[in-house]
Image (cartoon, helix red, strand yellow):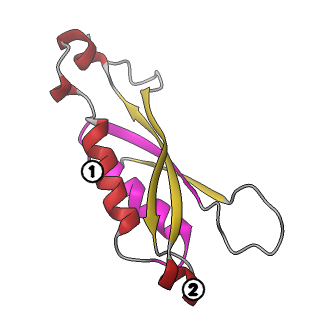
Amino acid sequence: MARDPRQPPDRIAVRGLRARGHHGVFDHERRDGQEFVVDVVLGVDTGEAARTDDLAHTVHYGLLSSRLVEVVEGEPVNLIETLADRLAAVCLAEPQVLEAEVTVHKPQAPVPHEFDDVTVTIQRRRP
């Protein structure tokens, strides 16, 4: 049975994915790096995977997680907005992913006050 396009897609989430990156606008951020935490929530039609019990019909979240870590550990950017957009592109490159919500946490952001976390959340969909 095909998914009813009027219904929202199913969700697959990876939360709390950690990697060290060198993103930020300040020299010390680029030089020293810091931990970033990534959450992704993917909109996916899981119907075929459920029917066939076959990994080929869904998102292999282990491999996707490795690709996301490569981006965080890769080429530095100034803004976590840019990082989030790059991560969303990786998610949408998966053929089964219809939409992606990506949150990038920067818990050691250079904020001169006591705080718990700084995050940026973006949502992207296939055209």
Residue 22: percent from left, percent from top: 47, 75
Residue count near mark 2 (Cα–Cα under 10 Å), binned few <14, some 14–19, many ≥20 = few
Residue 92: percent from left, percent from top: 33, 48
Which residue is labeled 2 in the image?
28
Q: Is residue 69 visible?
A: yes
In the image, what residue occupies the spot 36% across and 47% down?
A: 126
The earlier-in-sequence mark between 2 and 1 is 2
Q: Quadrant of residue 79?
A: bottom right
| In the rendered image, the vertical position of residue 59 relative to residue 20, given as above or below | above
In the image, what residue occupies the spot 50% across and 75% down?
A: 33
Residue 18: percent from left, percent from top: 46, 52
Horizontally, residue 30 falls left or right of residue 87, namely right
- Numbered range of the magenta stretch: 77-105
In the image, what residue occupies the spot 38% across and 18% down?
A: 4
Secondary structure beneath label 1 = loop
Secondary structure beneath label 2 = helix
Closer to viewer: mark 2 or mark 1: 2
Horizontally, residue 122 falls left or right of residue 85, namely right
| In the rendered image, the vertical position of residue 35 relative to residue 76, given as above or below | above
| 24 in magenta | no
Which residue is labeled 1 in the image?
93
In the image, what residue occupies the spot 23% across and 41% down?
A: 95
Whole-Å distance between the Cαs marked 2 and 1?
32 Å
Amino acid type, callout 2: His
| In the rendered image, the vertical position of residue 91 relative to residue 89, given as above or below | above
> Which residue is more in the foreground, 46 or 15?
15
Residue count near mark 1 (Cα–Cα under 10 Å), binned few <14, some 14–19, many ≥20 = few
Horizontally, residue 47 falls left or right of residue 12, namely left
Residue 112: percent from left, percent from top: 80, 75
| 92 in magenta | yes
